Image (tube, helix red, strand yellow):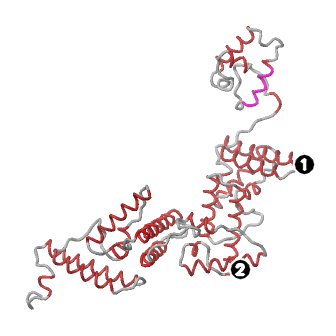
Amino acid sequence: FARWLRAANRDSMASRFLNDPDSLAGDIADYWANGGDDRKRLNSALSHFRRLSPEGQELQAVGPGPRLMGRRIHVPYPDDALIIDALANEERSKLRPVSTSKRNVVWNMASNQRRFSDWLQREGRESIASRLTGSDQQQQSLKDDYSNFTNAEGKKISVSLDRLRQYLGAESQLKQHNPYPDDALIIEALANEERSKLRPAATSRKNASNQRKFSAWLKREGRESIVSRLTGTDEQQRSLQEDFRAFTKEEGKKVVVSFDRLRQYLGAESQLKQHNPYPDDALMIDSFTKEELSKLGSDSTSKRKSVLNLASNKRRFSDWLRKKGRGSIASRLTGSDQQQQSLKDDLRAFTKAEGKRINVSLDRLRQYLGAESQLKQHNPYPDDALMIDSFANEELSKLGSDSTSQRIVVSKLVSNQRKFGDWLQTRGRESIASRLNGSDQQQ
């Protein structure tokens, strides 16, 4: 019949079974009239498609009748269907061709899981996948729904939520690890992102399980969490690696936790491909980043990512400046108007070279160093501005690249001087420079 439809340039069966049954019924009548169904089997054959239609909806083109073949097709949530089928395929791939009974067990389990998800969808409850590795409250609500489902079915139906949970990278609830809360939050967030990109599920779930296991070990041993050191100072990152070596030695085997993937998720550069900024820039960027992170709570994952992404962009820009032989960010950020303009020009050249807009937030760094935001700057008398800038350049030139705190003091002092100079000008008083070394009356 499908070949006849195609030859007669009619629409397919699939496109019309439920959406346009009248036109399909007309084509069936034409097919019969042209002697295409001489053995009168078409109607019976089409009746088998009833099992694919939603419960309670008839195939009008075929006419009323039973849902043949005795199978009830369940319609789970799309996100549930994805993980249920993926797990079933993985389980089946481990079996030998002769493992018929085990293969039946796998498919029965998958059928039960789809049946439960179908029930959740009909009852207007959330999907399995959306709650399986969620908060304690979400996981408890899923358990409660499973109890209600088995009560409604009138019998115990095994769906093995724990096996699905392990497949998604979470620990079995039969044997769970207890990581630091900040680690648990990041590990779960990364695992969810990996799943959304459909990365190899076996790899992502093993990584997540190993990460939680390592964090739980750190907690028991009284060592700091992964997240508190993952993007910290060189010393903190080294101590994390040393703890990981001690952990794997105790485990007696190599355990993959993929620190680098966690680091990138948090917005920091991969240690496999890091940028190499000017030393004075690196010190300033790291100090600023540390201060910003210290203001965030352990549950501020998105804000933490934003801060670390900005830090990565700044290091990347400084690395570009160093390679091009241009001055560092720190050496020009609070310098003369000419220096600050040259830094802006270099930033434009950098973004053009990268082919996209990269946010480095120079203004935020400038404020961190104690200078005014260029979005709201003070406007002192020209002779005051010249004197203040000269003083600032001289003071900053005396400081080493590691003198971040002293640099902040100088910049704040300069900011206050410009602010005072601006105040004098707006009120029609004489400039600082014109009176600073003048008569006793002027002073």
Q: Main secondary structure of the magenta part?
A: helix
Which residue is the site of mark 2?
246
**150 sits left or right of 214 in the view:** right
Residue shown at 61% from the left, 64% from the top: 261
Q: Viewer-proximal residue, 150 or 235?
A: 235
* In magenta stretch: residue 165: no
In which quadrant of the rendered view does residue 55 lie? top right
- Disc 1, SS: loop
Alpha carbons under labels 1 and 2: distance apart: 42 Å
- Disc 2, SS: helix
* In magenta stretch: residue 46: yes
Instruction: Classify the position of the N terminus by image quarter.
Output: top right
* 1 or 2: tag closer to the N-terminus: 1
Name the amino acid, label 2: Ala
Residue shown at 13% from the left, 73% from the top: 427
In which quadrant of the rendered view does residue 121 lie? top right
Give percent across and percent down for residue 290: 48, 75
Q: Is residue 392 above or below residue 164?
A: below
Give percent across and percent down for residue 76: 70, 42
Magenta residue span: 44-52
Label 2, residues with CA under 10 Å away: few <14, some 14-19, many ≥20: few
Mark 1 touching mark 2, by CB under 8 A?
Answer: no
Residue shown at 66% from the left, 71% from the top: 179
Q: Is residue 83 above or below residue 136?
A: above
Which residue is the site of mark 1?
99
Name the amino acid, label 1: Ser
Residue shown at 69% from the left, 47% from the top: 80
